[in-house]
Amino acid sequence: MSVIYVLLSISIIVALFFFLAFIISVKSGQYDDSYTPSIRMLFEDELVQKSSQTQESKKIEQTKMN
């Protein structure tokens, strides 16, 4: 029975270690996305065109309703 207590305490210590390592890495910017902003300008026109098309289709639907 004492083995369970030892394994449980070791697993909690290991889990706390990984949790602290994760928190430190998030605060230091390890998971910041540095790739997407550099390529966003390549795909921005498609997003603008899609949004303008949806706005035009909404305007057309509104004129049909009136």
Image (cartoon, helix red, strand yellow):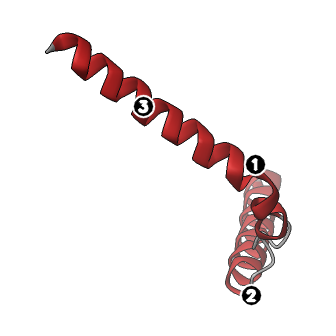
What is the x, y in percent for residue 19? Answer: 71, 70
For marks 1 and 3 on the same chain, the one whose residue lies earlier in the sequence = 1
What is the x, y in percent for residue 1? Answer: 75, 48
Residue visible at 75% across and 73% down in the picture: 32
Q: Is residue 54 above or below residue 42?
A: above
What is the x, y in percent for residue 55? Answer: 41, 35
- Determine the CA span between mark 3 and mark 2: 44 Å
| Camera-nearest residue between 53 and 12 | 53
Position of 52 with respect to 22 (left or right) is: left
What kind of element bears circle 2?
Answer: loop
For the residue carrying disc 3, how many other residues have a C-alpha within 10 Å: few (<14), some (14-19), or many (20+)?
few
Which residue is the site of mark 2? Answer: 28
For marks 2 and 1 on the same chain, the one whose residue lies earlier in the sequence = 1
Residue visible at 13% across and 15% down in the picture: 66
Which residue is the site of mark 3? Answer: 56
| Camera-nearest residue between 23 and 5 | 23
Residue 37, located in which quarter of the rendered image? bottom right
For marks 3 and 2 on the same chain, the one whose residue lies earlier in the sequence = 2
Instruction: Name the residue type under label 2.
Output: Ser
Residue visible at 82% across and 57% down in the picture: 42
What kind of element bears circle 1?
Answer: loop
Position of 30 with respect to 49 (left or right) is: right
Which residue is the site of mark 1? Answer: 1
Of marks 3 and 2, the one in the foreground: 3
What is the x, y in percent for residue 56? Answer: 42, 31
Position of 31 with respect to 35 (left or right) is: left
For the residue carrying disc 1, how many other residues have a C-alpha within 10 Å: few (<14), some (14-19), or many (20+)?
few
Residue 60, located in which quarter of the rendered image? top left
